[in-house]
Amino acid sequence: MRIEKPAASSEGPPNLADYEQARAAFSWEAVRRELDGLPNGGGLNIAYEAVGRHVQSGHGGQTAMIWLGKKGEREEITYAELDGLTNQLANVLANLGVEAGDRVYSLAGRIPELYVCALGALKHRAIFCPLFSAFGPEPIAQRMQLGEAKVLLTTERLYRRRVMEIRDRIPSLEHVIIVPDPKKPRSPENTIDWNNAMAGASPDYRIASTNPATPALLHFTSGTTGTPKGALHVHEAVLTHYVTGKLALDLHPEDIYWCTADPGWVTGTSYGIIAPLTNRATMVVDEAEFDSQRWYRILEEERVQVWYTAPTAIRMLMRSGPELPRSRNLSALRFMASVGEPLNPQAVVWGYEVFGRPFHDNWWQTETGGIMISNYASMDVKPGSMGKPLPGITAAIVREGNDGHIHRVDDPKKDGELALRPDWPSLFRGYWNNQDRYDACFRDGWYLSGDLARRDEEGYYWFVGRSDDVIKSAGHLIGPFEVESVIMGHPAVAEVGVIGKPDPVAGTIIKAFVSLQPGHQWSGELEKELLGFGRKNLGTAAPREIAFAESLPKTRSGKIMRRLLKARELGLPEGDTSTLEGENG
Amino acid sequence: MKRDEIRATLMACLSDVAPEIAEEEVEDDVDIRDELDLDSMDILRWVQGIHKALGVEIPEEDYGKMTSLGDAIDYVAGRI
C-alpha cells in the first residue's frame, strides 16, 4: 500500500519540493554557502553555525530551546543567552587547561547544562562525547577508558550512583563538573561545582580558527564482538546535520521542533541539538521519560510543528489508544518522522489515521552522522520502507561476488548489504584508537553498513535485517559481547549467550542464556539474582530475560552460536550446524 | 484488601521486573523512575504484573499517575 503525498496546501511547499530535481541540483559546495563559516575566514565550527551566527544576523532574541522539567518547570533560552552560556562553558574548559582535541564527556539527563556543555565544548574545539544517563557503571567506565576522557559533566545524583565507584579506573579523567542538587549544598569531594565555575567565567569567547576536518564528536556504538567502538566525527559534519534537517525533516527557521531522542545517542545530538539549531528552529527539550498523556500535552501546548521520534515510543502511543490524541488540538503538527529501527507499517498507517499525517521513517547510523535514506513530505510514503537516499548521497545494495569484490545488486527482488559511497561530510573519520575496525567498514569504494536491505523498482529501500548479531532494543544498538562479559562476572555463571528476542513494544528485548558453574543449581531465585546483577552493572543494556541452558551451542573454535540460540528461541529452522560442537557435536 | 497487602503485592511485582531493588530501600514518596532507575519498558512490565496479580486494569494513559510507590498504591486501592 502507499500513502499519497499531500496535495498542495496553504502551508507552502516543503524545502524538498521535488525529489528528482533536488537530487540533480544538489552540491555540497552550495550547502556550504548556506552556512556562514567563522568570521574572517576562520573555518567551520559546528557551534558557531548552530548559535553564534544567528546572533550575528540579528536573531539573538529568538527562543533556541524550550526546556520542560520533570516537575512541571518551563524555561526558555534565547539564541543570545545560549551563545553567552556556551561561551562561559568554553571559558571554564580553557581555565581548566582543556585543549583542542581533549575529550569532554557528559553523563546527564536532558537538562539545559548538557546542551550548554555540548556546544561549549565544540566552541573550544574539544571533542564532545555524550553518554546515555541510563547506562550502569560498567558501560560508563568502559567508554570513558576507551575514549580517554579528560573532563566529565554529570549531576550530583549520577556521580554518586554511577561514577564515584569507578572513577579510579579512569586515570585520564582530570576534572568532574557537577550540576548540583539544590537539596545538597556541597558538591562531592574532588569535583567542580557547575554554578561556581560558570559564575567565574566570562560570557565572551572567541572561537579559534577551526579547520573543517577538526574532530568534534565521539559517539560510542556497539559491534558484535569486542568493546564498543567510538565513532569520530568532524566539524564539517555540520553540513549534513544542517541540510538533512532542512530536507529530510523539513525544518524551517522558527519552527517549533521536538526531537524526543536523548543526546546520549547520536540522534539526540545530531537532531536533538545541531540540526534544529543550525536551521534556527526552536527546539523543545523534555527532561521526563515517556508518558503518553504528557507527550500529547507537549505537542498541543508547545504547538510542535515538526516531531522526530522513535518506533518504541510510537508503539507505546498506539497502545494508549486514539482517544487521547483526538482530544487534543494538534493542528500545528506539520511533519512527523521516526528513526531508530524500521517503523512497522501498522504504525505508519496509525499515524496517518490519528494525526492525518504519516510518520516518515528514515535510516542512518552512528557512523553516518546524519540521515542517509528518508521519506520526504513531497513523496508518497510506502509504509515499512525507509524511503530514498538524500540528495548528495549515493546508496546501493551490494553483494560480494565470486571474485571477492563488492558488486551492486540491481535486481529489486534480491536483498544484499546496504552500502554508501563514502563521500559525504558527516561520514565518521575513524573508530577511536582502532584503525583496523575502521578500515574493515570500507571495500571497493563503498562504506558497508552491516544492514541488509533491498531496493524496489521505484527506488525505495526496505530494511531486511542485520548482517551480524548486534541487537537493536528500543532503537538502541547493543553489543551482545558487552552484555555477555558482564553477566560472566557473576560467580554462578559458566557461559553466556545473548540474543535479541522480538517484543511487541520494544521491537527487541535482550535475552541471555546461561549455563552454570559446578555446585550451582538453577532456581527462580538465581534467575532474579542474575537479572538484578545485570541491571545494576549494565543499566539499560541489561537482559530483560535470563534462561538456563545445560550447555550452550558452540562452534568448533569455541564461539557461542548466538544465531542458533535465537533460532531455538523462536522455533525457526536451525540451519547448517555442521561446524557445531556441544550436545550434537 | 488492606493497604500493606497492596504494597506487598506491588513490591513483589516490582521485584520481578527489577530484582536488584530491595524492599527496605523503597520509600512511598520517592520517584520510582528516578530513584530506582526504571525506564518506560520496566513500568510497562510492572503494570502488566500488577494486572496479573490483582486483576486491576491500568490503562497506559494512567502510567503517569504512578510516579511513586505511594501513588501507585493509592491508584490500585481505588480500583480493586
Image: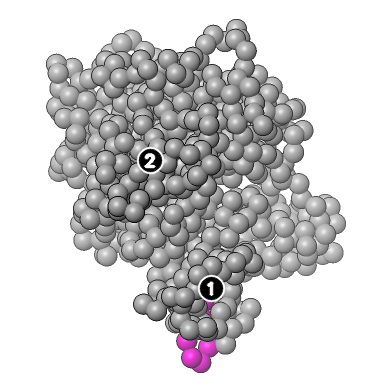
Distance (Cα) linking label 1 and label 2: 38 Å
User: Which residue is at 46% across, 42% downward?
Assistant: A262
Pointer 2 residue: A408
- Secondary structure beneath dot 1 equals strand
Q: Quadrant of residue A271?
A: top left
Q: Is residue A147 something that shows in the picture?
A: no
> Over which residues does the magenta segment extend?
A513-520
Q: Residue furthest bottom?
A: A519
Q: Residue furthest front?
A: A402
Residue A75 is left or right of residue A37, and the answer is right
**Residue A399, image x, y percentages:** 39, 48
Q: Nearer the viewer, residue A98 or A391?
A: A391
Q: Nearer the viewer, residue A559 or A202?
A: A559
What amino acid does circle 1 point to? Phe
Q: Nearer the viewer, residue A197 or A443?
A: A443
Chain of the residue that carries numbered disc 2 in the rendered image: A
**Residue A179, image x, y percentages:** 37, 44
What amino acid does circle 2 point to? Arg
**Residue B8, image x, y percentages:** 72, 68
Judged by depth in the image, the label closer to the viewer, 1 or 2, is 2
Q: Is residue A293 something that shows in the picture?
A: yes
Q: Quadrant of residue A490?
A: bottom left
- Quarter of the rendering occupied by the N terminus of chain A: top right
User: Which residue is at 29% across, 22% downward?
Assistant: A28
Pointer 1 residue: A513
- Placement of A475 over or under A530, stated as above or below: above
- Placement of A485 over or under B39, stated as above or below: below
